[in-house]
Amino acid sequence: MIPHSLRPKNYRQSLTYLAAGILIVSVTLYLALPIVALFLRIPPDQFFSTLHNPDVISALWLSLFTTVVTLVVVILVGTPFAYFHSRYTYPGKVIVDTLIDLPLVLPPAVAGVALLMLWGRTGLLGRYFNMFGITIAFTTLAVIMAQIFVASPFYLRQAKSLFEQLDPAYEQTARTLGSSPLRTLVLVTLPMTAGGLISGAVMTFGRALGEFGATIMFAGNLPGVTQTMPLAVYVGMEGDLYVGLTISILLVIISFTIMIIVRLVQKREAGHA
Amino acid sequence: MLEASMVKRLRDYTLDFTLRAESGQITVLMGTNGSGKSTSLNIIAGLLQPDTAKITLNGECICETREGINIPVEDRRIGYVLQNPAVFPHMTVHDNVAFGLRARRTPRAEVTGYVAEWMDRMHITDLAGVKAGNLSGGQKQRVALARALATDPVLLMLDEPFTALDAESTQSVKDLTRQYVRDFNIPCILVTHRVADSEEIGDRACVLCQGRMEWEGIPTEMPELCTVCRCP
């Protein structure tokens, strides 16, 4: 039974409903079917047995380790950076704004090449590190650096925008009440922007976890050292298909979880507003 | 007593005037939008840097630009309720009122006592456990006032405190402010653009126009030159 409000009132309206229905179903199927196909391609028992494959475990742990380190660095450095950037005017601020956004539009492979040109053994800075026997490219550190470069804008943009939008009256009032700048930041500014910061952090985590192009260019594809989950998928598709499929499904599950967390945080924020 | 001389170059004009506010009195600062009222309060509070200024509070210099004296905002002991009462929405009413006391490291037992006393005075005791984000405009204004007064300020500044209030809340906030200023014998600066408020609550009135003091005196004697400031 079609609800009264949805019953077509005339021919033109029914055509609109039909077009809208076709469009919604088409877009939904276009987005959902590849995911369904991924899950249907591998039998459940095969999926669970492949989870014990050393390549899968190694890639999983390396991805989780590098992504968590990336997230911690981005939050610890990005939060005060975004705060100062939003609060102060300084020469070249527009350029810094553009640089924050650049990794979002830059092809990841180009980001990887750029990092290699800077930190590689013969790179602009890397050559000096190399003189002291310190190698950065093609190490786990390079994986983290590539993830930070590519994923940090998600957090920085969000944090910057949150701090800019917060009415200065809250911080000013806290200061007149005797609160130091640091205490004001910790007790007023951060709690009032926490929901948005968490959303930004979760999106950064997701982007870092899926990082492929910059990592393969700058860190290479060494199992156990730089071979993260997306890289292991690539290798798996050329060798053991089930390894590729199992890791892909793991990434889909993690991505879904991330989106659910973001939605829940946004819902909670909307409830508080 | 507050005595503040300040100069600050703004976009459209230069703010340049001297403001005096006697202890135990409410000095009303009036003027049209953009006449420099809130900017003046921000300079006195230390939230905005003046080009030149000399501000003394009860004989103590809190800002003198020529001698490089500039007491930080948090040490000026000024109770300032901004146009947006800015109650912290993630905290309860109790924690809002306690915020300034905790910031000034008041012993815990005393904090409890002061907070209970001020919530009682402002008739917000029933709201103690309510998240401040869920309060009405009038309730927020009372919380903001209780929070400012609980810190035992030596100067009280209220920026358009009646804007978001209904008639009943307005009267209540006016009565509480007047009583506090008399009881504790501190100067109070109240910013408003409504002559009726000025005449009802103010002991003295100052009219600002384009950053300059156009008139000061007893509110009921305000001459016709202030018609521009009258509410319709």
Image: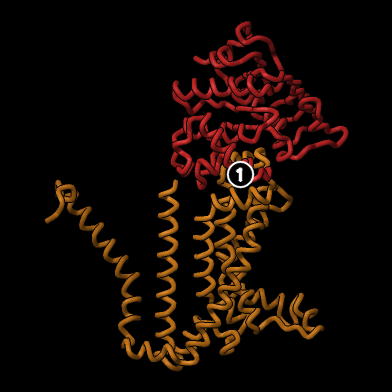
The picture quadrant where one finds residue B64 is top right
Q: What is the image's colouring?
A: by chain
Residue B86: which quarter of the image? top right
How many callouts does the rendering have?
Answer: 1
Q: Position of residue B125 (x, y in %)?
A: 48, 35
Q: Is residue A203 above or below residue B111?
A: below
Image: A61 above or below B172? below
Q: Nearer the viewer, residue B162 or B60?
A: B60
Q: State the residue in front, B47 or B182.
A: B182
Q: Chain of mark 1?
A: B
Q: x and y percent of residue B221 in the render?
A: 63, 6
| Amino acid on which disc 1 is placed | Ala
* Residue beneath the point at 67% across and 56% down: A95
Is any part of residue B147 visible from this angle?
A: yes
Q: In percent of the image, x 30 and y 83: which residue is there? A: A40
Q: Chain letter for red?
A: B
The residue wearing badge 1 is: B109
**Image side of residue A205 versus residue B49, left or right:** left
- How far from the left and from the top, in percent, is residue B174? 54, 21
Q: Residue at x 62, y 53 (%)?
A: A186
Residue B5 or residue A136, whichever sits in front: B5
Q: Is residue A9 left or right of residue B183?
A: left
Tell me if mark 1 has few (under 14), some (14-19) or many (20+) residues whose alpha carbon lies within 10 angstroms of its own. Answer: few
Residue at the spot x=70%, y=34% of the render? B77
**Residue that sits furthest to the bottom in the current view:** A239
Chain with orange colouring: A
Q: Is residue A4 left or right of residue A67?
A: left
Could you say whether the residue bearing mark 1 is in a helix, strand or loop? helix
Q: Is residue A86 above or below residue B20?
A: below
* Residue A251, position as x, y percentages in the image: 44, 77
Task: Give above or below for A185 relative to A231.
Answer: above
